[in-house]
Image (cartoon, helix red, strand yellow):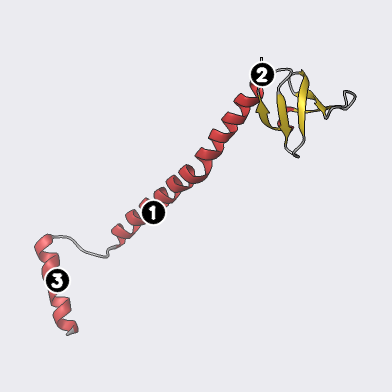
Amino acid sequence: MYFATMLLDEASTAATGTQTGGVGGLGISYIISIVAMIAIFYFLLLRPQKKEQKRVEEMLKQMEVGDVVVTTSGFYGVLIDVTEDDVIVEFGSNKNCRIPMRKSAIAQVEKAEK
């Protein structure tokens, strides 16, 4: 049975002029699989992260005095002052509770009604 299978393989190789299972085919399939894995990694991890980062940057650029914000720790407050890197947020109904913080500590911005 083994001998018949070998003869059949040799006959198909001679007829088509190609060899199956050669070393060259292994290298190409390895490279293709690596490229496919890199593409999957990019589209599943890196691309969505960059989109989210752009969204957050745009949100922070559009902040204005009077907007209601939610900090990364979950506190709600109103923006009192906005500078290049920092903001001053007023928390609660007590007008004396104003805390300066980095813009990166803002998780969500709700525009003030005009």
Q: x and y percent of residue 35 in the render?
A: 40, 48
Rendered image: mark on residue 113:
2
Q: Is residue 64 left or right of residue 88?
A: left
Q: Which mark is residue 10?
A: 3
Compare residues 51 and 38 and report the one nearer the observer.
51
Asked which secondary structure carries label 2, the reply is loop
Which corner quadrant of the image does residue 25 belong to? bottom left
Q: Is residue 39 above or below residue 66?
A: below
What residue occupies the far right of the structure in this picture?
96
* Amino acid beneath label 3: Glu
Q: Look at the numbered disc 1 and give the secondary structure of its residue.
A: helix
Q: Earlier in the sequence, mark 3 or mark 2?
A: 3
Q: Identify the mark nearer the N-term, 1 or 2.
A: 1
Among the two numbered marks 3 and 1 on one chain, the one whose residue lies closer to the N terminus: 3
Extreme residue toward the top, this view: 114
Few, some or many residues within 10 Å of mark 3 (<14, 14–19, 20+): few
Picture layout, residue 37 above or below residue 63: below
Q: What separation in Å lies between label 1 and label 2 (alpha carbons)?
A: 53 Å
Report which residue position mark 1 lands on.
33
